[in-house]
Amino acid sequence: MPLHLLKLCVGAESIRDLEEWIEEQMLQRRRLGRPQEQTHTTRMVPKRVDELVADGSLFWVIKGQVSARQRLLAVRPFTDGDGIGRCHLVLEPIVVPVEPRPCRPFQGWRYLAEAERPRDIAQSGEGFGLMPEALRRELAELGLL
């Protein structure tokens, strides 16, 4: 059974903000001649890597709600120039909206079990994907979703 990560998407106001940041990062990597992959750097290295890369995803919390996910392709530990251990989370650069769910702030990342993950909006079958993100967010905040 896959295992997932949950992480705050600091600075993003919407799923579109996250998508634009990814597009910008990919363009910059292309200009610099670097491999075309999206990475997110984090301080702590997950210990359950095999479970995470076996079809796991990174779920993003945007403005207090679990809002989207990206498939996790690899976890690459490294030591930075200051001698601090970190890791790159290698992500598929496709952002998949999920059914919004409230989430309190936290530091770093958290494991998220498969049974606890929000469903993809496209799989919900209830027309959520047709709603603008702001409306989904507001309805979720009111407890109507």
Image: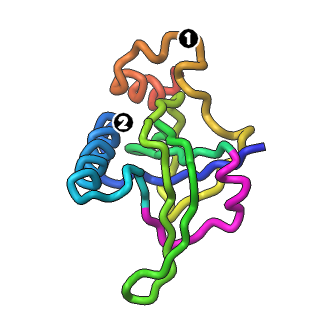
**Amino acid marked by disc 1:** Glu
Q: Residue furthest front?
A: 33
Q: Which mark is residue 15?
A: 2
Indicate yes or no whether the magenta region holds residue 45. yes
* In-image side of 32 versus 53 (left or right): left
Q: Residue furthest left?
A: 31
* In-image side of 10 versus 99 (left or right): left
Closer to us: 122 or 75: 75
Range of the magenta residues?
41-54
Q: Residues within 10 Å of mark 1 (few under 14, many from 20)?
A: few
Q: Residues within 10 Å of mark 2 (few under 14, many from 20)?
A: many
> Which residue corresponds to the image point at 51% horizontal and 80% vertical from the top-left?
85
> Which residue corresponds to the image point at 47% horizontal and 67% vertical from the top-left?
42
**Relative to 46, is 24 above or below?**
above
Which sits earlier in the primary sequence, circle 2 or circle 1? 2
How far, Cα to Cα, is label 2 from label 1?
20 Å
**Relative to 61, is 118 above or below?**
above
* In-image side of 63 versus 32 (left or right): right
In the picture, residue 115 is in which quadrant? Answer: top right
Q: Locate residue 137, reporting x and y percent.
A: 41, 29
**Amino acid marked by disc 2:** Ile
Q: Residue furthest bottom?
A: 83
Q: Locate residue 96, reporting x and y percent.
A: 48, 32
In the picture, residue 35 is in which quadrant? Answer: bottom left
Question: Element type at marker 2?
Answer: helix
Q: Which mark is residue 126?
A: 1
Indicate yes or no whether the magenta region holds residue 4. no
Q: Which mark is residue 142?
A: none
Q: Locate residue 90, reporting x and y percent.
A: 49, 55
Closer to us: 101 or 40: 40
> Which residue corresponds to the image point at 59% horizontal and 18% vertical from the top-left?
124
